Amino acid sequence: MSRKPFILRNPSVLIVLAVLAVFTAAVTLMSQAYGNGAIPTSTVKILGKTLCLALAAVAMDLVWGYVGILSLGQMAFFALGGYMVGQWLMYARTEAIVATSLAQNPIPPTAQELQEAVANQIFGVVGSSDLPLVWSFAHSLPLQLILVVAVPGLLALVFGWLAFRSRVNGVYLSILTQAMTLALALWLFQNDSGFRGNNGLSGLQNIPGLEGVSQATLSVWFLWASAFALALLYVLAAWVVSGKFGSVIRAIRDDETRVRFLGYPVEGFKLVIFTLAAMITAVAGALYYPQAGIINPAELMPIASIYLAVWVAIGGRGRLYGAMIGAVAVSLLSSWFTGGRAPDLALPGYVVRWVDWWQVALGLSFVLVTLFAPRGISGIFDWLAGLRPPRRNGRDLGPDQGALQEQEAKA
């Protein structure tokens, strides 16, 4: 008897792909570039960036929801992906501008003179005129795209190997990931880091070679790219957590010591997921920042990774679609509240302005979800599907006849 294909064995994957396809088609047909213009370009960009944040949340859920590693440094990989693609965007755009300007000279500039002029244009703001070593491949889009996943992946591999081989777990590992992120952010804030310090990389929304394409059209193209990346990598993540590999990493999350005693290389499993999640997060960042238009070291601060963990918790940790739901819901609500669209709430003697109170409301919702709905928003789908945690009546989970391990796993 042949085994069903992976997607058919996971109906939730089909549902996610179908919803994503319908959403992308609907936004396209209502965009200013390809539709009736009901959705403005600024909103299309917000929706495209939201899909990127949903992809980052899926990666966070791989690490936290399935392996139990509360990584407070995921947004460092997100920003690194943005920096890698941002280097090419800024270099190529500046090179085109400088080349056009120097072409008016009686004597055409040499390649060396052109590079020096580009370096002076980019780094003059931080008092330098030299092209840093970290920009050695900025002229090549294929090489920078490789670096999008190679640099965050290598950082995660080295950090994870050092941390996991030392058996660092729990809150101590979370503190280490947070310290890594803070150290990287503080380094990038320095002008001599090679990434323009606090100025960051700007003008990323101007895609070299596509100057004649309107922002309305580019926003839809990036929406398509973000949706495709989310669909592809969601399927990859769902495949990774299925089967025997998925069972092992869940077991590591629930009882790492027992899994180690059974002979499984726990550190290897954790390192694979941690590195894979870093690379997925970097892809999300590489698609996000060209839509945002700018990136600076503030994007790496630990608070951003904490927000990401909050999104996953609100959506439902341990369910990939729950992480997506949490990221989309909180991101869109944040744009609505902080954008001044939400009406003020008039209370006796005080007016609640959501621009000031939105973060308080988000923190309160996180506390309430943790206390009263640990399955998050995705718990609603469990309730609709009739999945309930079984009443164990004091019985332990285990291999004996009276255990309820199978029913517990389904719920």
Image (cartoon, rainbow, N blue to C red):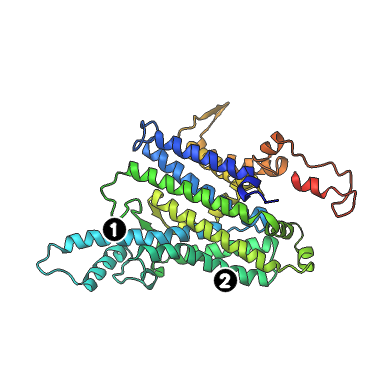
Q: Which residue is identified by label 1? A: 93
Q: Position of residue 271 (x, y in %)?
A: 62, 66
Name of the residue lying farthest toward the front? 1
Left or right for 301, reference 238: left
Q: Residue at x 39, y 53 (%)?
A: 294
Q: Residue at x 41, y 40 (%)?
A: 44
Q: Is residue 222 left or right of residue 127?
A: right
Q: What separation in Å lies between label 1 and label 2 (alpha carbons)?
A: 33 Å
Judge by depth and name the residue closer to the eye, 313 or 221: 221
Give how far across and how far down residue 279 sits, in percent: 52, 60
- Of 25 and 147, which appears nearest the observer? 25
Pick whichever, 50 or 195, lies toward us: 50
Crowd around label 2: few <14 · some 14–19 · many ≥20 (10 Å) = few
Identify which amino acid the numbered label 1 is placed on. Answer: Arg
Residue visible at 64% across and 60% down in the picture = 174
Which dot marks residue 224?
none
Q: Is residue 180 above or below residue 342?
A: below
**Residue type, label 2:** Val
Observer able to see residue 189: no
Residue 158 tag number: 2
For marks 1 and 2, the one nearer the N-term is: 1
Query: In screen coordinates, is 44 left or right of 353?
Result: left
